[in-house]
Amino acid sequence: MIYWHLFLAFFIPNIIGYGGGPAIIPLIEAEVVGRYGWMNAQQFAETLALGNALPSPIATKMAGYVGYDVAGFGGALVAVLATVAPSLLLMLGALGLLYRHRHSPRVQRMSQWVRPVIAMMMAWLTWSFLSEGVAGAGLIHTLIIASAAAIALLRFRTHPAFVVLGALVYGGLFLGG
């Protein structure tokens, strides 16, 4: 029964919540703290703070932690599945609909606009990261990291994970306070 409760505690907020992780945190808190009492408000706040300090989506981190705390590895698995299931089901439904109508001129025109829109979104994201890097580290450090990363990726075909690790080491050595 605990697995079913874990599933409901994370599935319902993720299916009715709109706006991503930060928007559904209060809904998850209502389930975890208010409805099931698996944590008190202070424990939930500490878990949220820890989750915000780590990379990746906040809802899946919260689900994994709470699920593990309540029912071990199986609980973590159930809670994470319940968190991603709503998005997965909606994506599968949308893909099925698009595939069924793939020969429609409207769907083909719509599909032609996907790549340019994604390219613009990526360009905006790159500009945003660059602006934040210059504001946080300064222009010189940002140029050093960007140049070294470009050379490592393009000239030496270094795996991106090692490039990120190198940038972290550089930041720790030269930018760490």
Image (cartoon, helix red, strand yellow):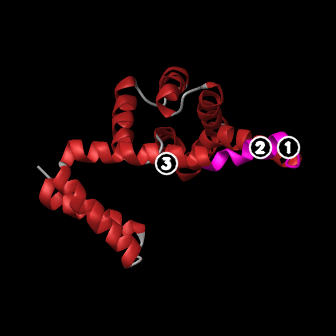
132 or 112: nearer the viewer: 112
Q: Within the magenta stretch, is there residue 164?
A: no
Stretch of the chain drawn in magenta: 102-115
Q: Are discs 2 and 1 less than 8 Å apart at CB?
A: yes
Residue highlighted by disc 3: 122
Image-quadrant location for residue 10: top right
On-image quarter of the N terminus: top right
Q: Nearer the viewer, mark 3 or mark 2?
A: 2
At numbered mark 2, what does the secondary structure look like: helix, strand or loop?
Answer: helix
Residue highlighted by disc 2: 109
Q: How many marks?
A: 3
Q: Please name the residue shown 33% across and 34% down the image.
A: 46
The answer to whether residue 32 of the structure is visible from this angle is no
Residue highlighted by disc 1: 105
Structural crowding at the residue carrying mark 2, measured as other residues with C-alpha within 10 Å and reported as few (<14), some (14–19) or many (≥20): few
Image-quadrant location for residue 90: top right
The answer to whether residue 126 of the structure is visible from this angle is yes
Q: Classify residue 15 as left or right of residue 133.
A: right
**Mark 3 belongs to which amino acid?**
Met
At numbered mark 1, what does the secondary structure look like: helix, strand or loop?
Answer: helix
Q: Position of residue 43 (x, y in %)?
A: 36, 31
Predominant SS of the magenta segment: helix
Structural crowding at the residue carrying mark 1, measured as other residues with C-alpha within 10 Å and reported as few (<14), some (14–19) or many (≥20): few
Question: Alpha carbon of mark 3 to alpha carbon of mark 1: how far?
Answer: 27 Å
Which numbered marker is on residue 19?
Answer: none
Question: Alpha carbon of mark 3 to alpha carbon of mark 2: how far?
Answer: 21 Å
Q: Position of residue 29 (x, y in %)?
A: 48, 25
